Image: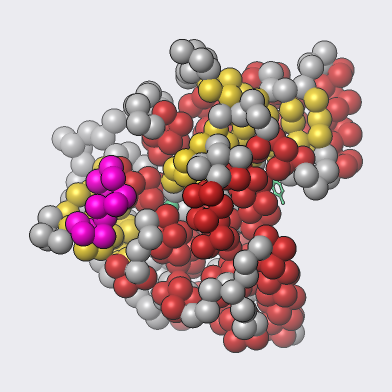
Amino acid sequence: MKKQQITVLGSTGSIGTSTLDVVARHPDRFEVFALSAATQVDLLLAQCAQFRPRFAVMASAPHAALLAEKLVANSLPTQVLQSQDALELIASHDEVDAVMAAIVGAAGLAPCLAAARAGKRLLLANKEALVVGGGLFMQTVREGRATLLPIDSEHSAIFQCLPEDPATWVQRVDSILLTASGGPFRQRDPSTLAEITPAQACAHPNFSMGRKISVDSATMMNKALEVIEARWLFDLHPDQIKVVIHPQQIIHSMVQFKDASILAQLGTPDMRVPIACGLAWPERIASGASKLDFSTLSALAFEDADAHRFPGLHLSWQALKAAEGTTAVLNAANEVAVGAFLSGRLRFDHIHAVNLATLEAVSPSKPNSLEALLDLDSQARNAAEQAADRLAA
Ligand code: NAD
Ligand code: MG
């Protein structure tokens, strides 16, 4: 079997390192073609030593120079790239078969579109790219004849439960149920949300994840982004997407069919499962995750999300029903608000206030190019920064 050449965008992050963990278990199947990171030079160096990629991309020139120096000192042949287009180059290179999109935020949109245009197998963890790209992202996937496979655990679950032929979904599927952990503040008194610190928000009960998605899980904006992600991935009406809190994270999501039958996907909460599923689909390979032990599994619980505690969740349906481009505005606002919270500038409960204020300030017209999307993204970021300044004052 010819080995698959893999590019990992965001290889030093939580999803990136889990991806390389799975890849390392299957040296007969996968070879790493390129890796990329923002600032973590030493971890990227160690990954280059282990996986010997052709290219390594760093987001800034000083970091790229430092990595290049260290590679030479260690007699490693990897070539370092740093430019606006470097991520797009490693995402669309002729020799690449599959691209793991594991950058966080809208920064990952351009390389995702490049991979889609080049017809790659695109493994999408970077949900913000699809939330921003929306219809244009899906159109690029179709036109490039790319294979888009979800890595977000909920969407991987839905994908595994849906019938194989998408042409049958409209006729067979009633709705989907995205499960949510409820995050660390599911039971916290909502009147104390103002006091939450970044360290408390990043302490997720079941997963160790990047800081941005950890805060999103705590506000449930992560689920809001996932509702939007599901709308595009599975071509659903927003009202066909439901959310149920399930704190144990054993059921990773469910599909409800027209006859009231439900299919669910279960397993231990370990991101290597959806990663292995995407890497090998339609085959199945070892992921390294432990198996579910039903003899020790206690009761599975379910509850509705409390709109008072998690006001951001409903912005997803609202944004999906508004003008196209509104989801890009919501994403930009949330990225700015989470950044401001993590740097200690904004209160936790003001993240929602920034999102609301930005949605009110920016009214998009349908963006039909990457440039238009990036322009809308930066307009929304400016409005969100202003809202954050007002709230912080
Ligand atoms: P992370 O912060 O741990 O890692 C992000 C990676 O992207 C790092 O390698 C970082 O160097 C790189 N990066 C960050 N900003 C960049 C920029 N501007 N340009 C280039 N590279 C940049 O994040 P994560 O938890 O691994 O999440 C990555 C993506 O996967 C997010 O979109 C997240 O929503 C999604 N996701 C994560 C999980 C999880 O369990 N961690 C689950 C589902 C989906
Ligand atoms: Mg998820």
Residue 185: % across, % down: 43, 65
Left/right placement of residue 335 relative to residue 305 reads right
**Nearest the camera: 177 or 326?**
326
Q: Where is 168 relative to 148, above or below? A: below
Quadrant of the rendered image containing residue 231 = bottom left
Left/right placement of residue 290 relative to residue 128 reads left
Residue segment shown in magenta: 161-173
Residue 120: % across, % down: 55, 37
Residue with the most extreme left position: 259
Residue 6: % across, % down: 58, 28
Left/right placement of residue 119 relative to residue 180 reads right
Residue 59: % across, % down: 78, 44
**Nearest the camera: 133 or 305?**
133
Residue at 56 percent across and 60 percent down: it is 136
Q: Where is 74 relative to 237, above or below? A: above
Residue at 73 percent across and 69 percent down: it is 375
Residue 121 visible in the picture = yes
Residue at 51 percent across and 62 percent down: it is 135
Left/right placement of residue 346 relative to residue 136 reads right
Colour approach in the figure: secondary structure
Tell me how many marks there are. 0
What is the magenta segment's predominant secondary structure? helix
